[in-house]
Image: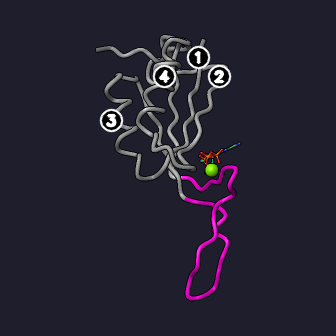
Amino acid sequence: MLIKVEAIVREEKYEEVKDALNKIQVNGITVCQIMGCGTQRGYKEVVRGAEIDIYLKPKVKFEIVVSSEEWEKKVIDAIQAAAYTGDVGDGKIFSYEIRSAMRIRTKETGYDALQSEF
Ligand SMILES: Nc1ncnc2c1ncn2[C@@H]1O[C@H](COP(=O)(O)OP(=O)(O)OP(=O)(O)O)[C@@H](O)[C@H]1O
Ligand SMILES: [Mg+2]
């Protein structure tokens, strides 16, 4: 089973989450800078005297594809621990089954496409 774990975390947690994933030795990571909001829908901020709605805030998204539910749990637990502050806006972790994977260089698919040679 191939599973993608997608985590949206605080920008300032980027290093910690990256290091935590490196520590458990995942076989690949995709990161992007995104904008988002959760249930509080951003927050109000005063800019030059005028109150403006900051609806979307910059966040960092990690994507990790793994090949078992055991690895799914390992990745989710590592991200949760590294991204946690306890305040609102800590982020969310989603996971879902994906249909296929292919390593372009070798044409390996599925589980094999994710394995390391080392
Ligand atoms: N339902 C959702 N769908 C898609 N993305 C979401 C959803 N909820 C949160 N996100 C993403 O996660 C980021 C962080 O969300 P956030 O941690 O504020 O969630 P929350 O549910 O409001 O939790 P909290 O109460 O701890 O703030 C958002 O900026 C957004 O990118
Ligand atoms: Mg929130």
Q: Which residue is mark 4?
A: 103
- Check the image and report above or below for 87 versus 95: below
Q: Please give left or right for residue 16 compared with residue 40 in the image.
A: left
Q: Dot 3 lies on which element?
A: helix
Disc nearest the viewer among 4 and 3: 3
Q: Amino acid at mark 2?
A: Ile
Q: Quadrant of residue 118?
A: top left
Which residue is found at the position 46% from the left and 18% from the top?
A: 114
Along the horizontal axis of the image, is 50 left or right of 106? right
Residue at x 62% of width, y 32% of height: 94
Are circles 1 and 4 on residues that touch, CB within 8 Å?
A: no
Q: Give whichever of 70, 2 is nearer the camera.
A: 70
Residue type pointed to by label 3: Asp
Quadrant of residue 110 within the rendered picture: top right
Q: Closer to the camera: disc 2 or disc 4?
A: 2
Q: CA distance from mark 4 to mark 3?
A: 24 Å
Distance in Å between CA atoms under marks 1 and 4 = 14 Å
Q: CA distance from mark 2 to mark 1?
A: 6 Å
**Circle 3 residue:** 19
Q: Which residue is mark 2?
A: 98
Identify the magenta region. 34-57
Name the residue nearer the viewer: 42 or 113: 42
User: Residue type at mark 4?
Assistant: Arg
Q: Secondary structure at mark 2?
A: loop
Query: CA gap, disc 1 to disc 3?
Result: 23 Å
Q: Are marks 2 and 1 in contact (CB under 8 Å)?
A: yes
- Which residue is labeled 1 in the image? 2
CB contact under 8 Å: marks 2 and 4: no
Disc nearer the start of the sequence (3/2): 3
Task: Estimate how packed mark 1 is, as few (under 14), some (14 to 19) or many (20 or more) residues with alpha carbons within 10 Å.
Answer: some
Mark found first going from the N terminus, 4 or 3: 3
